[in-house]
Image (cartoon, rainbow, N blue to C red):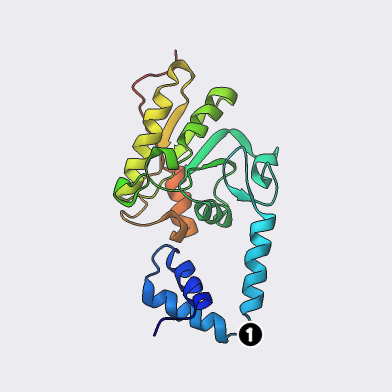
């Protein structure tokens, strides 16, 4: 017997979440139906949708535009740390190891999963650097295959700036291969930033 239409719609909504299959979606749907806190969850989702926006400068998720980091004059606007996702910003901020600005790509380059350059904010990063300049761009993508491909994509975009291209560095290899930025300990992140290495562009300024 098929589920009632409202329940089936809820199951299908959960199925659209990353990494959630049919079975997990069904468990979540039934949990929501029998949990009195479901209304609180629904209210929290509506509140998040209504009160979050994308920062027009760094593309991070925020309450204001520009976000708190981009609005902070105490931050180094000439040093931009490029990360894949908003949770990477949260990890670096929680560790208190970086005092520059960020740029969030909103994903990683992975054609096998349907993510190509048009889904990322690489063009917005290039335009940002071209318009406002930067002394250094730090590539802080994850140290896995997708992260390396994403870093190469960003590198190639910055190379097209020619004499306007900033110095580009990559996090030190102290970051464990195959790991994710969001799960790294403060000390690992601090060492990775301190030991970052410069990445040579094919076209260098002056």
Specify whether 134 is left or right of 109.
Answer: right
Q: Name the residue under label 1.
A: 36
Label 1 secondary element: loop
Q: Quadrant of residue 90?
A: bottom right
Say if 7 sits above or below 159 in the image: below
Could you say where residue 35 lies in the image, as x and y percent from the top left? 58, 85
**Could you say which is closer to the camera, residue 22 or residue 41?**
22
Say if 136 sits above or below 205 in the image: below
Could you say where residue 174 lies in the image, as x and y percent from the top left? 36, 50
Q: Quadrant of the C terminus?
A: top left
Instruction: Residue at 45% x, 21% y: name it.
Output: 161
Instruction: Residue at 40% x, 43% y: name it.
Output: 171
Say if 7 sits above or below 133 in the image: below
Around disc 1, counting alpha carbons within 10 Å, would you say few (fewer than 14), some (14 to 19), or many (20 or more)? few
**Could you say which is closer to the camera, residue 202 or residue 24?**
24
Q: In which quarter of the image is residue 176?
A: bottom left
Instruction: Residue at 46% x, 52% y: name it.
Output: 189
Instruction: Residue at 53% x, 52% y: name it.
Output: 86
Could you say where residue 97 lies in the image, as x and y percent from the top left? 54, 49
Specify whether 65 is left or right of 88.
Answer: right
**Could you say which is closer to the camera, residue 21 or residue 204?**
21
Q: How many numbered marks, from 0 up?
A: 1
Q: Quadrant of the N terminus?
A: bottom left
Could you say where residue 76 lies in the image, as x and y percent from the top left? 61, 36
**Could you say which is closer to the camera, residue 175 or residue 142?**
142
């Amino acid at each position: 017997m098929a589920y009632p239409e409202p329940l089936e719609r809820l199951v299908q909504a959960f199925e659209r979440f990353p990494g959630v299959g049919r079975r997990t979606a069904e468990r979540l749907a039934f949990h929501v139906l029998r949990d009195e806190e479901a209304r609180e969850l629904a209210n929290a989702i509506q509140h998040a949708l209504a009160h979050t926006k994308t920062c027009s400068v760094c593309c991070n998720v925020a309450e204001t535009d520009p976000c708190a980091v981009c609005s902070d004059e105490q931050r180094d606007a000439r040093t931009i740390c490029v990360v894949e996702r908003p949770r990477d910003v949260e990890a670096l901020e929680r560790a208190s190891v970086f005092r520059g600005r960020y740029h969030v790509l909103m994903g990683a380059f992975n054609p096998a999963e349907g993510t190509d350059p048009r889904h990322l904010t690489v063009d917005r990063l290039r335009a940002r650097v071209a318009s406002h300049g930067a002394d250094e761009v730090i590539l802080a993508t994850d140290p896995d295959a997708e992260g390396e491909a994403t870093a190469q994509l960003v590198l190639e975009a910055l190379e097209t700036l020619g004499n306007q291209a900033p110095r580009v560095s990559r996090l030190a290899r102290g970051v464990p291969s195959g790991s994710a930025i969001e799960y790294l300990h403060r000390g690992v992140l601090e060492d990775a930033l301190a030991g970052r290495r410069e990445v040579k562009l094919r076209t260098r300024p002056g």
